[in-house]
């Protein structure tokens, strides 16, 4: 089992475990601290997190900035990739296509999803992502393209 997934499974069952794991995840990938993710699900082929709407991620009209949403989606994709990548392989994002559908006026739930068939297409794996407002409105739809290759020998 991947060490990131094992850590999530150990910590998430503790009181405030989702917040503790989000902090630990942000230490491993410091850029994600900008969106302060609260991980709510991590398993092979599925990950989700809450991106809180707060002053530090808002734009000039008071909504969550589009790039902050992309950061939340990339964090969710990273969780999914860590939980799904086969032993002996590594992953690297190589592109993202997104469509902004509605204003991000609340906390957002960022979701990343794949299937076994998606991973069978390696080295090119597409991860479907979306972000949803508290009222259920989908605000962003997209795909993050991964490059999945064997880890180099040492």
Image: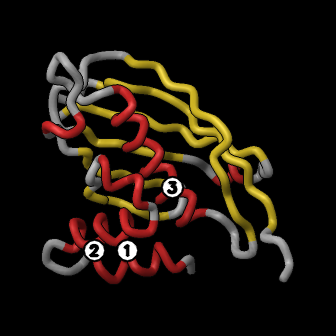
Q: Quadrant of residue 61?
A: top left
Q: Position of residue 90 (x, y in %)?
A: 70, 64
Rendered residue at 50%/25% (across/down): 98
Q: Quadrant of residue 91?
A: bottom right
| Dot in front, 2 or 3 | 3
Indicate which disc residue 80 carries: none
Q: Is residue 33 left or right of residue 16?
A: right
Q: Nearer the viewer, residue 32 or 8?
A: 32
Whether the residues at callouts 2 and 3 have beta carbons within 8 Å, the answer is: no
How far, Cα to Cα, is label 1 from label 2? 6 Å
Name the quarter where the C terminus is drawn: bottom right
Vertical position of residue 46 compared to residue 130: above or below: below
Pointer 2: residues within 10 angstroms few (<14), some, or many (20+)? some
Rendered residue at 25%/48% (across/down): 50
Whether the residues at callouts 1 and 2 have beta carbons within 8 Å, the answer is: yes
**Could you tell me which secondary element the residue under label 1 belongs to?**
helix
Q: Nearer the viewer, residue 95 or 111?
A: 95
Q: Earlier in the sequence, mark 3 or mark 1?
A: 1
Pointer 3: residues within 10 angstroms few (<14), some, or many (20+)? many
Q: Position of residue 15 (x, y in %)?
A: 13, 77
Rendered residue at 20%/19% (across/down): 60
Q: Is residue 2 left or right of residue 8?
A: right
Rendered residue at 38%/68% (across/down): 27
Residue on which the image places disc 2:
12
Vertical position of residue 117 compared to residue 55: above or below: below
Name the quarter where the N terminus is drawn: bottom right
Residue on which the image places disc 1:
8
**Could you tell me which secondary element the residue under label 2 belongs to?**
loop
Q: Position of residue 104 (x, y in %)?
A: 24, 25
Q: Earlier in the sequence, mark 2 or mark 3?
A: 2
Indicate which disc residue 78 carries: 3
């Amino acid at each position: 089992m991947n060490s990131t997934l094992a850590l999530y499974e150990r910590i998430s069952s503790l009181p405030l475990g989702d917040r503790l794991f989000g902090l630990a995840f942000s230490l491993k990938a410091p850029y994600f601290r900008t969106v302060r993710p609260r991980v709510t699900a991590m398993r092979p082929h599925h990950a989700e997190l809450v991106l809180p709407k707060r002053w530090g991620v808002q734009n000039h009209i008071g909504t969550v900035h589009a790039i902050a949403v992309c950061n939340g989606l990339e964090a969710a994709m990273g969780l999914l990739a860590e939980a799904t990548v086969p032993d002996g392989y590594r992953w690297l994002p190589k592109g993202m296509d997104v469509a902004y559908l509605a204003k991000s006026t609340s906390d957002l739930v960022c979701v990343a999803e794949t299937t076994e068939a998606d991973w069978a297409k390696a080295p090119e794996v597409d991860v479907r992502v979306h972000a949803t407002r508290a009222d259920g409105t989908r605000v962003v739809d997209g795909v993050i393209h991964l490059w999945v290759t064997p880890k180099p020998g040492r």
